Image (tube, rainbow, N blue to C red):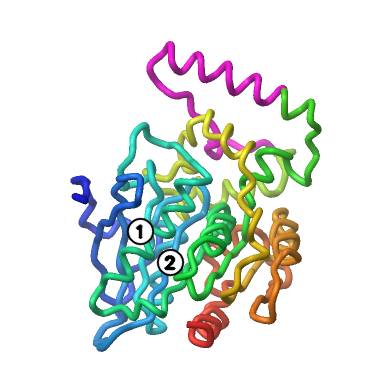
Amino acid sequence: MDNQTLELTQEWDKVFPKSAKVNHSKVIFHNRYGITLAADLYQPKESSGKLAAIAVAGPFGAVKEQSSGLYAQTMAEKGFLAIAFDPSYTGESGGLPRYVASPDINTEDFSAAVDFLSTLENVDPEKIGIIGICGWGGMALNAAAIDTRIKATVTSTMYDMTRVTANGYFDSMSADDRYAMRQQLNAQRTEDYKNGSYALAGGVPDEVPEDAPFFVKDYFAYYKTERGYHARSLNSNGGWNVTSSLSFANMPILQYSHEIRNAVLIVHGEKAHSCYFSKDAFTKLIGDNKELLIIPDAVHTDLYDNMDVIPFDKLEQFFKENM
């Protein structure tokens, strides 16, 4: 299959500084839906032989120039070949219409990354792992449940996007609430078709009122400031196609997570509003190669970019022991 031609930015446009310890390059690969994905490849300098490799994605609505790139670059500093990729329909990756999210296609994106890594001459195909951040944490667990080539999986500050879409935060929605949401989203489908375009929603607002929930302020502090703003990030800007929520409300992604046999490490901040997603996901996992790590006092976005909080030494140990 031919990869589509993508316009890839060649200058360094990440929200984090470039490491002198790794070589960086832009790469492309395709998924089984024929969508070409763009990625940043990070390789430790002066490396030789076949390396263990890691594919990183997330957070939900972010791009590879943000948190996932920081994770990938840091893991490359620790001796892994790592890629951070833009999921289908977002960032520099292909796919039309733009700004679509899909529980199936975005899970497939992880497996497509494994396809790509498995065929690199300098990668050991028996030593491939993945990291999913925020909403891509749930996708990573879903990918690990279906893709036995993934030898080790890390989720960081995980969201189960299908659960939160169908049930609301803390499972506060009723069946009537879901029906009203479906009515609204299907009405939007009609409007989108009439207009020949797709309404967007879900980006972080440009201004946050004083009485906004803390997690909204937490997102603002990352996506709307110099700390994490990026022009291609959906969360920094207009958000996703509204109607993407339909599939997430109807297709729970963690149905078979209890059948994951390979190693899983779930990491979350103690004070994150989203911590219950990780705790509940961990209770479903079976086997003595699964671990839940709660970081004291950390909030949700601390695990996006706070180098004093993200347990990279633990991640290094976990991948080296399990791949």
9 in relation to 46, above or below: above
Q: Earlier in the sequence, mark 2 or mark 1?
A: 1
Identified by mark 2, the residue type is Leu
Observer-nearest of 283 and 17 = 283
- Who's the residue at 71% across and 22% down the image? 180
112 or 223: nearer the eye? 112
Q: Real-space Cα distance between discs 2 and 1?
A: 9 Å
Highlighted magenta segment, given as a residue range: 180-209
Look at label 1 and name its amino acid. Answer: Lys
* Residue 165: percent from left, percent from top: 65, 39
Circle 2: element type:
helix
Give the residue at x 72% y 39%: 168
**Coordinates of residue 163 in the picture (x, y in percent):** 68, 45
Residue visible at 48% across and 64% down? 147
The answer to whether residue 155 is left or right of residue 124 is right
- Is the residue under label 1 in contact with that under label 2 (CB below 8 Å)? yes
Q: Establish if 272 lies above or below 186.
A: below
Q: Which residue is mark 1?
A: 14
**Callout 1 secondary element:** loop
Residue with the mark numbered 2:
70
Residue 18 among those drawn in magenta:
no
Where in the figure is residue 141, as x and y percent of width and height?
58, 61
